[in-house]
Amino acid sequence: MTDDPPRNTARPPGTAPPGDGGPPSASPPRLPALTLSGLTVRFAGLTALDGVSFTVEPGSVHAVIGPNGAGKSTCFNVLSGVYRATAGSVRLGDTELTGLAPHRIAALGVARTFQNLALPPHATVADSMLLGRHRLTRAGFLASGLGLPSAAGEARRHRARVAEIAEFVGLAGDLDRPAGTLPYGKQKLVELGRALCMEPRVLLLDEPVAGMTADERRRTAAVVSGVRDSLGISIVLVEHDMGVVMRLADTVTVLDFGRLIASGPPARVQNDPAVVRAYLGADAAPDPADQEPTP
Ligand SMILES: Nc1ncnc2c1ncn2[C@@H]1O[C@H](COP(=O)(O)OP(=O)(O)OP(=O)(O)O)[C@@H](O)[C@H]1O
């Protein structure tokens, strides 16, 4: 893969995607913040998330990091509706997401990618990405089945939007290839493209660069920052690659044993003694409480 930044050929979210019917608007509406308040998840005696609260500001990249077992995936699974919170809430703007089924949360504009590839193995890149437009499709089963002009027109508009998004993520030349035959890094970009095809307001990225070569990591990081900068979509990023986290994130929240131990700009969080201790062990950084007071 090359390392060119993505070209801004995609329309911002909320500006009438093809097939969605509404008028295009010149300036995108202000996107809502995603707010987690006191989020707690317990599994039979184990507290995987313990009263976690933070806000993902609109149009920002918010990384959630922490050692293995810290609760990052649990947090993602609650945000996307796969797990139910034991207590606390998740809101997108004024809309309560807590307890909604995954498809309802997706319909409200929260899209996610998965840690492991979840692409249909034989489908082309274009068809895999079209799956992301399912909820925006208006033509009924009958109209599509009978090949009515209205359905054909809508299908054409969806394919045009898929082509725009493919260009944005750097897959314009791969649309007709079976997704399963592409290099791993490009397959992950197909997943990202499919999530963008949902015209999301919030994108949840679960370890987007895991298993990639250095080149693929750079390319994917450039696409992710393009999604924020050009499309204004809020991104929640769970990622173990600290280089990518520090480069991309506007805010970093650190979890450890299900608790939030630090949250703030990357440079500050990186030097937080509690974070250093969580990653490197109890002896790695002095606890300020243990230090002799200076005379
Ligand atoms: N469905 C489940 N049932 C029981 N325990 C679970 C379940 N999902 C997660 N856990 C437990 O909750 C804790 C947090 O797990 P989680 O997968 O959220 O951590 P993580 O930070 O994503 O870890 P990793 O970086 O290894 O993926 C762990 O102790 C894990 O074993």
Image (spheres, helix red, strand yellow):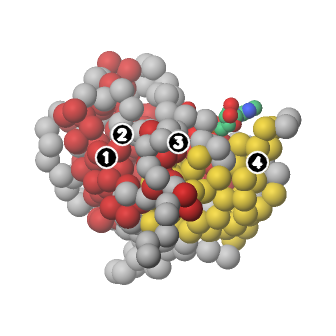
Going by the numbered disc 1, the residue's amino acid type is Val
Q: Nearer the viewer, mark 2 or mark 3?
A: 3
Residue marked by disc 2: 241
Quick one: SS at disc 3? loop
Q: CA distance from mark 2 to mark 3?
A: 22 Å
Q: CA distance from mark 1 to mark 3?
A: 25 Å
Going by the numbered disc 2, the residue's amino acid type is Asp
Residue at coordinates 48% horizontally, 41% vertically from top-left? 283
Task: Give me the disc on residue 244.
Answer: 1
31 or 51: nearer the viewer: 51
Q: Quadrant of the C terminus?
A: bottom left
Quick one: SS at disc 2? loop
Crowding around mark 3 (Cα neighbors within 10 Å: few <14, some 14 to 19, many 20+) is few
Work out whether 54 lies above or below 206.
Answer: below
227 or 286: nearer the viewer: 286
Q: Quadrant of residue 207?
A: top left
Work out whether 53 lies above or below 23.
Answer: above
Q: Position of residue 100 (x, y in %)?
A: 76, 55
Task: Give me the disc on residue 282.
Answer: 3
Q: Are marks 1 and 3 in contact (CB under 8 Å)?
A: no
Q: CA distance from mark 4 to mark 2?
A: 25 Å
Residue 106 relative to residue 67: left or right: right
Q: Quadrant of residue 16?
A: bottom left
Going by the numbered disc 3, the residue's amino acid type is Ala
Residue 181 relative to residue 77: left or right: left
Residue at coordinates 76% horizontally, 48% vertically from top-left? 41
- Nearest to N terminus: mark 1 or mark 4: 4
